[in-house]
Every structure is written in C-alpha cells, then in structure tokens.
Image: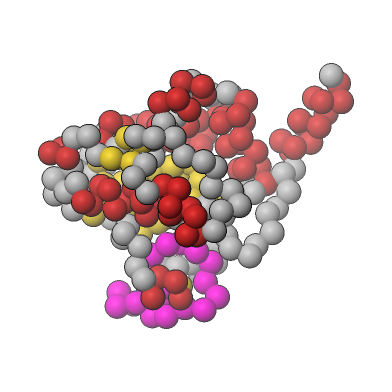
C-alpha cells in the first residue's frame, strides 16, 4: 500500500500541475481557485489503484469484513494529515440508501469509520461517531461515465440531515472509502452546512487523480488469478 506523495491542492487534495497561492500560504489547484467547494479540505491516504483498490473491492464486493480494520487504519492516517485539533468533531460516514445497504449488508464507509474513530480516540482525540446525522433519501444511479453536470443532477436532493439540532455549530468530518470527482463530498457537505454544521472536512481511504493511469494490482491480483485457476 502506498501513501500519497508529491504536491497536492491544499483544499481538494488533487495533484498539482497548475496552481495558485492561497491566503494561508498553501498552493491550490485551478479549480479550487475559481470556485471553492463546500468542504474546507479533503484528504486521502492513497491513490485508488493497485493493492489499495483491490482491498477496498474485497470489502465492498466480496464481503471480506476484516479488510475494514486495515482500511480504517489508513483512514485514521488520512484524518491525522488534516493537522487540526479534533476536539468535539463528529464523524459522519457517507450513507448508503437503505435498499443498497440491505443488499450489501453493511455500509463500508461506516465500518472503516468505526475503526478510525477507535484508533483516534485511543490516541487522545475526542471525535465522536455519528452515523445517523446524514441519510440518503433516494437511490442514485452509478456516477461512472457521467459528466460533472450529470453527477450533480444525479445527487441533487439525495441526502438530508434528519437531526439538524445535533449538527448546530459542530465541526463535521465526512468520511468515505473513495474520493472520485468530489461531487458526493460536495453535495453532502452542502447539506450538512445548511443544517447548521460549523464546517466540514472530508477524509477518504483513497482518491482518484485526474489524468493519471491506475497502477495495476500486484499481490492481491495475482492471488485472485491463482484462486481462479485452481477453481
């Protein structure tokens, strides 16, 4: 597993090619310099490729639940990279629609978040896991292959905050398995902020970088191929 290295946008975490200096002295990408997203920052542990992608797929699609422990540890590392005082932050995993959750049997973001919160609390952080503060009110189509406009339209109105009183003036840490285009993170952040959250930061285990080819999986891919050959 490889942690992200190199220069990244201070706001969205995208790889920097063309950037502008931010007021904080950090560099930001051209997209964030033109229009800041609703969240204050987004961080991830590694790129969505290679063994890390395989491990996420084992959890999501093969129901290999022990993978959530390892992935949750990577999520905790991503959260620490925010370098903020985590006192009183509420951790909110991106929710699945109830039909998808019933089909899968779990929400992978919630499983990883519980491990991350446990590790952070053991190190002295006073973060609190609050999975019910954000819900998905309707199912959505896959975002794969959609334009940015279509992605936003697909998610519009999909999320809501059922208990806004518990969000009032609290910093929120929104967590998920993968940050792809940021559309889901931005929509969830808008809903949380409208409901009264003071600020929203985003942390994921992996993220997709624009224009970068994915590294092939090594050990896990070879193991799966061998398993298939034996069958």
Q: Residue at x 37, y 49 (%)?
A: 156
Relative to 31, does residue 139 appear above or below in the rendering?
Answer: above
Tell me where residue 118 sits by quadrant: top left
Can see residue 54? yes
- Magenta span contains residue 10: no
Q: Quadrant of the N terminus?
A: top right
Q: How many marks?
A: 0
Residue 115: x and y in percent read 41, 31
Residue 229: x and y in percent read 87, 25
Q: In the rendered structure, which segment of residues is drawn in magenta? A: 11-28
Q: Main secondary structure of the magenta part?
A: loop
- Magenta span contains residue 26: yes
Q: Residue at x 47, y 59 (%)?
A: 149
Q: Residue furthest right?
A: 229
Relative to 102, does residue 69 appear above or below in the rendering?
Answer: below
Q: Residue 18 versus residue 134: which sits nearer the camera?
A: 134
Relative to 183, does residue 167 appear above or below in the rendering?
Answer: above
Q: Quadrant of the C terminus?
A: top right
Q: Is residue 34 left or right of residue 193?
A: right
Image colouring: secondary structure
Q: Residue at x 37, y 54 (%)?
A: 186
Q: Is residue 20 left or right of residue 67?
A: left
Q: Residue 14 versus residue 165: which sits nearer the camera?
A: 165
Tell me where residue 24 sits by quadrant: bottom left
Can see residue 170? no
Q: Is residue 156 left or right of residue 46?
A: left
Residue 58: x and y in percent read 62, 30
Q: Residue 217 versus residue 134: which sits nearer the camera?
A: 134
Residue 124: x and y in percent read 26, 39
Tell me where residue 213 sits by quadrant: bottom right
Relative to 224, does residue 149 appear above or below in the rendering?
Answer: below
């Amino acid at each position: 597993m490889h942690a992200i290295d190199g220069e990244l946008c201070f706001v969205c975490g995208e790889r920097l090619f063309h950037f502008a200096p931010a007021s904080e002295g950090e560099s930001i990408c051209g997209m964030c310099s033109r229009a800041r997203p609703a969240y204050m920052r987004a961080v991830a542990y590694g790129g969505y490729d290679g063994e890390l992608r395989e491990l996420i797929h084992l959890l999501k699609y093969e129901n290999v639940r022990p993978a959530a422990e390892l992935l949750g540890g990577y999520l905790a590392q991503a959260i620490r990279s925010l370098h903020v005082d985590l006192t009183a932050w509420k951790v909110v995993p991106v929710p699945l629609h109830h039909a998808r959750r019933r089909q899968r049997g779990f929400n992978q973001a919630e499983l990883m978040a519980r491990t991350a919160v446990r590790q952070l609390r053991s190190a002295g952080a006073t973060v609190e896991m609050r999975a019910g503060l954000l819900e998905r009110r309707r199912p959505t189509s896959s975002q794969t292959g959609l334009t940015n406009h279509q992605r936003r339209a697909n998610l519009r109105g999909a999320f809501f905050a059922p208990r806004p009183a518990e969000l009032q003036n609290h910093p929120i840490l929104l967590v998920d398995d993968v940050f792809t285009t940021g559309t889901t993170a931005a929509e969830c952040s808008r809903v949380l902020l409208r409901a009264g959250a003071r600020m929203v930061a985003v942390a994921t285990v992996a993220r997709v970088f624009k224009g970068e080819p994915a590294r092939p999986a090594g050990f896990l891919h070879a193991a799966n191929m061998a398993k298939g050959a034996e069958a």
